[in-house]
Image: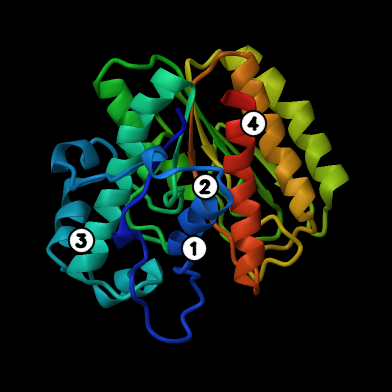
């Protein structure tokens, strides 16, 4: 069965006019239920995790100051969100959703988190709407529980997974692969184990060619026994914060290729949604929903 982490806290209230499309976390599960892709039993509600798992990926000083609402004004500004107790609780519950999802991935081949993909969160700081790095925390959790020996993080958000790269820079058991827009944020990029910079304005043909030339060989070389997939939909031409020119169908084919590859090779995969900032919320929801539709088609 396809299992999906979701909690009502994912939709966090923001000041009017804020550019982050928080409503997508409420609309996406509604859409999946409405169209019959999912039923209520597909969803599970994550909880408040213990600090020790978060501290496997994040520095104690940073996490404690975040938890106690003691970040500096500059740190809060870089996070992109007004800091509050409710926001911190939300971030921790998102991380728990990804940690719990890995068990369902191991059992069923694939599992999702409606939120997550918070790849700009460094070990010691927040950045760009990311306060805690959910997939990094879950990768450390897998290691701690001895559930995986070699982990591959496939980050196909339009922005480089700079925080993820920093967290695992000295860990050869976690391979970080980021394929992102060359001219896009972050303008000072970190060094992933493999970075592929996609030229600005690239569309479906160029984008998919790069991916298909890279991923199978990478998996063959690294031989991961678990994959984290960050399926950001900000590669779309309509995205306000991306500089690529992919269509919704091209984004869908990207997801099909990644998920079919994982399925064919029998490698468990956990998917977190990542970014999506198209002007029309319906475009964001359609692109994200395609990932779930494909998972159901391929796996179930």
User: Looking at this view, is 247 or 191 the one in front?
Assistant: 247
Quickly name the residue at label 1: 27
Dot 4 and dot 2 residues touching (CB under 8 Å)? no
Residue 201 at least partly seen:
yes
Tell us which disc is closer to us: 2 or 1.
1
Return the x and y of residue 9 as percentages of the image width and height.
29, 61
Q: Nearer the viewer, mark 4 or mark 3?
A: 4
Q: Secondary structure at mark 1?
A: helix
Q: CA distance from mark 1 to mark 3?
A: 28 Å
In the picture shown, does residue 188 fall above or below 282? Answer: above
Which image quarter holds the C terminus? top right
Residue nearer the viewer, 107 or 175: 107
Lower sequence index among marks 2 and 3: 3
Q: Earlier in the sequence, mark 4 or mark 3?
A: 3
- Residue 194 visible to an observer of this rendering: no
Work out how far the residue at label 2 is from the one at label 3, CA to CA, in angstroms.
Answer: 21 Å
> Badge 2 is on which residue?
161
As drawn, 159 above or below 171 = below
Does 180 sit above or below residue 24? above
- Mark 4 secondary-structure assignment: helix
């Amino acid at each position: 069965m396809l299992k999906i982490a979701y909690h009502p806290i994912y939709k966090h209230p923001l000041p009017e006019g804020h550019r982050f499309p928080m409503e997508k976390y409420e609309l996406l599960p509604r859409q999946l239920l409405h169209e019959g892709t999912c039923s209520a039993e597909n969803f599970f509600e994550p909880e408040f995790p213990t600090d020790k798992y978060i501290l496997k990926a994040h520095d104690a000083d940073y996490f404690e100051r975040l938890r106690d609402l003691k970040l500096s004004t500059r740190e809060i500004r870089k996070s992109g969100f007004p800091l509050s107790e409710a926001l911190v609780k939300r971030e921790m519950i998102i991380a728990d959703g990804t940690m719990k999802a890995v068990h369902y991935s191991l059992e069923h081949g694939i599992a999702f988190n409606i939120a997550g993909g918070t790849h700009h969160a460094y070990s010691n700081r927040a950045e760009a709407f990311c306060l805690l790095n959910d997939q990094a925390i879950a990768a450390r959790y897998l290691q701690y529980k001895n559930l995986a020996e070699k982990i591959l993080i496939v980050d196909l958000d339009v922005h480089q997974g700079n925080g993820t790269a920093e967290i695992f820079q000295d860990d050869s058991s976690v391979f970080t692969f980021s394929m992102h827009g060359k001219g896009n944020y972050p303008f000072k990029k970190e060094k992933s184990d493999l970075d592929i910079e996609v030229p600005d304005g690239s569309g479906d043909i160029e984008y998919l060619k790069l991916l298909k030339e890279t991923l199978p060989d990478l998996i063959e070389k690294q031989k991961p026994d678990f994959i984290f997939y960050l399926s950001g939909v900000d590669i779309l031409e309509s995205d306000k914060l991306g500089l690529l020119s992919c269509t919704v169908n091209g984004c869908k084919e990207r997801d099909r290729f990644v998920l079919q590859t994982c399925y064919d090779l029998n490698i468990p995969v956990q998917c977190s949604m990542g970014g999506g900032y198209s002007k029309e919320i319906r475009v964001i929801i359609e692109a994200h929903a395609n990932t779930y539709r494909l998972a159901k088609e391929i796996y179930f």
